[in-house]
Image: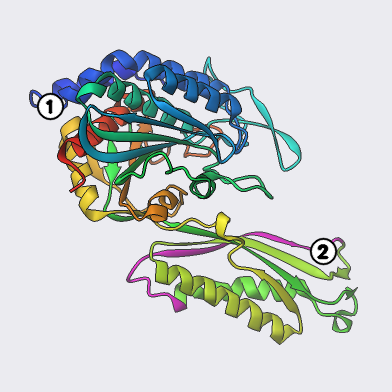
Amino acid sequence: MTRILPAGCLLLAIATALPAGAAEPAATQLAPLLPQMSAWRRDFHQHPELSNRETRTAKIVAEELRRMGYEVRTGIAHTGVTGVIKGGRPGPKLAIRADMDALPVSEEVELPFASKAKGEYLGKQVAVMHACGHDAHMAMTLGVAAALAKQRRDLPGEVMFIFQPAEEGAPPGEEGGAPLMVKEGVFEALRPDAIFGMHVVSTLPVGTVAVREGGAMASSDTFRIVVKGRQSHGATPWAGVDPIVTAAEIVTAAQTIVSRKLDINKEPAVVTFGIFDGGSRFNIVPERAELQGTVRAFDEDMRQQALASLRDITTHVAAAHGATVELQVPLSVDSSNPVNYNDPALTRRLRASLQAALGAEHVEEARRWTASEDFPHFGRAIEVPSVYFFVGATPPDSDPATAPGNHSPKFFLDEGALATGSTAMLQAALDYLEAGKN
């Protein structure tokens, strides 16, 4: 089995590999907290909870923040938690966000703290696993919170920690995640001047972080299209209107949206159909067929153009076949995420902090990722800049190119990532608070 690199060893390596003083402030403060971060992470990993069901997780987070001296608020967006601390000196206001939910995935990694948890998803009992690394996000962020609390008297400004439920998406029929936290007034206690976030990824080796200016992760819009025809015997299709043939042509025609309608010299985009559901018997032309899928983009205008083109294609293809359509493109406002956009000026400042904390050779230019996040809802809601960076999680003896990815039942996080991510985030926070929002 792949080994777990001790977090303390990696932190010591980071500190000693740099010029004197370069990483010492953050690394020194975090060193005594690493065993606790590992314990938090392993406990969260062993007891994962699905979106909007993070009750045990939220209780632990709230208790830890209170113990550190934070002003805590709970129950935001069902299970969300915030903690605010005021420094002893004037300065800017910063928010740092971590997500809490797990996925309906059955763990296939042999660990002494592997998940055996069960939950209910779509009416069925399922296995639950922190297959995306949110357990590590919480542990690292609690470590940063503890380090800041210890220097509260000398700390400039104020910091809010946001522990968010349902980043993976609320269950059908429910609201949740960042949009609901915003709707329920997450920033009533403190309106930050900037927001930071991070995510562990299997595509980077442990000890490495990556960040980029501009669009880091794509927007995402879920869509649902119901094609309504007229049922007939399969032997006499001319007596009906075939929704399966109509839906198939919609799927085919929609492939021209990216290849022929969008200027991909500007940014990439994706249109994917993930569900094609229609019919119940081989010799019956059914009454309806349903399509579901997703649109991804890195540019808002291209995003809206793709959605409009999908609506146009669907409507006109259906009309040509004599069918009608029920469109939900996008499915709903709450199911959509904007581009995860890193403010260029703030990103440059954060990159300098990451390089100071870890060494420039450990800070990479992040590739655009067509996955999406609801993190940008926070910054957009109050029109403040945000930055989101990535933390390598793959062990040094594994190839990131072939390592099981996030959301895989075999996703494996080297706990050295706890040292890397917390050191990077703490240094970024301290530098931002000390320098001021400008």
Q: Is residue 42 above or below residue 310?
A: above
**Mark 2, other Cα within 10 Å: few <14 / some 14–19 / many ≥20:** some
Mark 1 closeness class: few <14, some 14–19, many ≥20 residues within 10 Å: some
Q: CA distance from mark 2 to mark 1?
A: 64 Å
Left or right relative to 84: residue 166: right
* Quadrant hosting residue 394: top left
- Up-down relation of residue 199 to residue 336 (above or below): above
Q: Which residue is mark 1?
A: 18
Q: How many marks?
A: 2
**Left or right of 310 in this view: 10:** left
Image location of residue 253, percent across then percent down: 58, 76
Q: Earlier in the sequence, mark 2 or mark 1?
A: 1
Q: Secondary structure at mark 1?
A: loop
Q: Residue at x 86, y 64 (%)?
A: 282
State the residue position of label 2: 279
- At which x and y percent is residue 116? 63, 22
The amino acid type, in three-letter code, at marker 1 is Leu
List x then y, in percent, for residue 369: 39, 52
User: For this view, does 145 lie left or right of residue 238?
Assistant: left
Q: Is residue 413 among the parts visible in the rendering?
A: no
Q: Residue furthest left?
A: 20
Question: Which amino acid type is marked by label 2?
Answer: Gly
Residue 387 within the magenta-colored segment of the rendering: no
The residue at the point 47 percent across, 71 percent down is 304
| Front-lying residue, 7 or 123 | 123
Q: Which residues are magenta?
A: 261-280
- Tell me what residue is drawn at x 58 percent, y 37 percent: 103
Q: Position of residue 414 (x, y in %)?
A: 39, 25
Give the residue at x 42% y 75%.
Answer: 262
Q: Which mark is residue 232?
A: none
Residue 161 or residue 5, whichever sits in front: 161
Q: Is residue 298 above or below residue 327?
A: above
